[in-house]
Amino acid sequence: MSTDAAYTMTRSQIHRMIENLVMYEEGGYNYSLVDKDRGGLTFAGLSENLLRQYSLYGLRAKQIPQDRVHNIYEREFIGPMNLDQMPEHVAVPLFSAGVNIGPHTAAKLWQRALSTTRDIDLAVDGVIGQLTLKATQKVARKQLSSQRVLAEFYRLWMHHYVDLVRRDLDQLGFLTGWTNRVFRHVVAPNYI
């Protein structure tokens, strides 16, 4: 599928999106280990599993180049979610959700939002492929339609967090931070 240039992100937009996520949502280029956090140790928002996979686990923060962090985000989130082929106002919240709840889950929420608000017959499979991209670009052409789909995505994203807490009350301490993450995108969509 050829993508409409108006609905794709430039390299500088992708770089800014990653940098802003790391700095404003993930606490910067630092290690973080929070009691009861299922993600375990993170560095710049990257999970311990990813740090091990890319042979970064155990290195001091100053030993990890920022461009390496960016490359991992592109390889593990932006590429698989095809965020570079989406308009920025959609890609940014999807990226944030993908980093926090996993790219597959974030993609499912986006597909569900597209399906329920636009009556689009779309498989909710967690894979942002050609059909999901085409539907995304179609709604992006209509600002009001795009806002409705994003509002539904935010509702589903918030509901996902509530469900996590319902299943495991140990996660209750994270609910405020998680919901603030969603609210930042709702009230200030261009902050990141």
Image (cartoon, grey):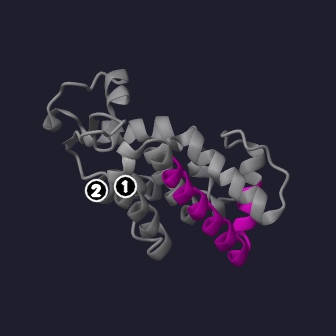
Q: Quadrant of the N terminus?
A: top right
Q: Which residue is mark 2?
A: 23
Residue at 64% across, 61% down: 7
Residue 153 sits inside the magenta stretch: yes
Q: Residue 82 at x, y = what percent?
A: 60, 45
Report which quarter residue 146 is drawn in: bottom right
The residue type indicated by label 2 comes to Met
In this rendering, position of residue 143 left or right of residue 182: right
Residue at 54% across, 54% down: 94
Q: Is residue 60 visible?
A: yes
Residue at 32% across, 36% down: 68
Q: Which residue is mark 1?
A: 21
Report which quarter residue 179 is drawn in: bottom left
Q: Residue 144 at x, y = what percent?
A: 70, 78
Residue 192 sits inside the magenta stretch: no
The residues bearing labels 1 and 2 have C-alpha atoms spaced at a distance of 6 Å
In this rendering, position of residue 106 left or right of residue 39: right
Callout 2: SS: helix
Residue at 24% across, 40% down: 35
The answer to whether 27 is drawn above or below residue 167 in the figure is below
Q: Residue 190 at x, y = what percent?
A: 45, 71
The residue type indicated by label 1 comes to Leu
Over which residues does the magenta segment extend? 135-163
Give 121 or 4, whichever is nearer the viewer: 121
Q: Is residue 87 visible?
A: no
Report which quarter residue 91 is drawn in: bottom right
